[in-house]
Amino acid sequence: MSLIQVRRWLRESEHVVVLTGAGMSAESGIPTFRGVGGLWKQFRAEELATPQAFALRPNLVWEWYNWRRELIAGTRPNAGHQALAQIEQRIADFTLVTQNVDGLDGQAGIRNLVRLHGDIWGTVCTRCGERRENREVPLAHLPPLCHCHPEALLRPGVVWFGEALPAAEWERAMAAVQRADLLLVVGTSAVVYPASSLITMGIRYGAHTVEINPQETRLSGEMEVCLHGSAAEMLPDLASVLF
Ligand code: OAD
């Protein structure tokens, strides 16, 4: 019954927002952060994903990002990413807001993409601030340096714990959620703030809210519908109603 309801909402919606987390890329072979096999079960976030950690041990932090970049480079978008790209083609106002930094969503062809936590394929110079794409895998020199100065360290172009989200991306995400008829929340544990506040914002602004996740999350109880399945199995089913 609930799947039928969600299919109907999707067919009738003009403004659709999809908020994704690490579970979206799990079926591409990229580990999630929490739960069984999660990265934060094996590694300590505060030693690898904070500005303080980078200031103290830039090499260690870069080794970890180098490893993740290699892992991600060997993956492909899954059927869930492809289904989102198809949904985008049929919805007048579609926005994908992602917490993921892997770039698989863009690779699947999704265009209107808001990257809340940055991009693992970007670097930012800690001295001149220049943001650049860097797809070298593995990186030949750790830590990588900027051309602006012989000692200017590059950092990964991602958002770390304790840092603000990129302001323009956050504004775009909020605006999209506020006008959404339908908010699909896919593969996120909804524990990381402020990304998770977009869900409560969607509820407050009257969007239909649907969670796609094999597990219960902190916000499952707030959703109108929870579809207990994986992104790569549920999203193609939803996309098919538009074709
Ligand atoms: P989490 O690892 O916290 O949560 C992943 C969610 O995906 C869980 O709720 C799983 O049940 C679900 N999941 C697993 N496999 C799935 C599948 N095949 N299909 C659908 N769902 C599946 O990841 P996030 O919520 O993305 O931040 O974590 C948020 C942020 O915390 C990340 O962006 C990262 C991390 O620390 C930063 O690095 C700043």
Image (cartoon, grey):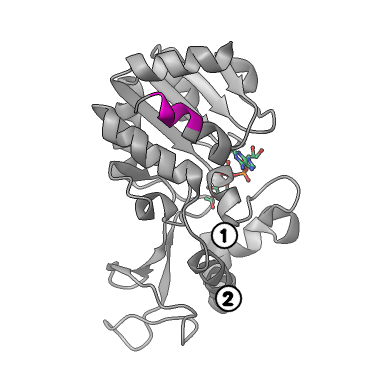
Q: Any mark on residue 63, and which? A: 2
Residue position marked by numbered label 1 in the rendering: 49
For badge 2, the amino acid type reads Glu
Query: Ligand 1 is located in which of the four quadrants?
Result: top right
Left or right of residue 213: residue 122: left
**Magenta residues, as a range?**
237-241
Is the CB of mark 1 within 8 Å of ligand 1?
yes
Give the camera-side residue of 52 and 109.
109
Name the side, left or right, on which 169 lies relative to 164.
left
Spatial CA span between label 1 and label 2 = 12 Å
Q: Horizontal and vertical percent for residue 184?
A: 47, 27
Looking at the picture, how far across and down is residue 118, in whole percent?
A: 40, 54
- Magenta stretch secondary structure, dominant: helix
Tell me if residue 36 can be seen: yes
Per the image, label 2 sits on a secondary structure element best described as: helix
Residue 23 vs residue 214: left or right? Answer: left
In the rendered view of the protein, which quadrant contains the N terminus? top right
Against 195, residue 34 (above or below) is below
Q: Earlier in the sequence, mark 1 or mark 2?
A: 1
Give the vertical position of 241 relative to 30 (above or below): above
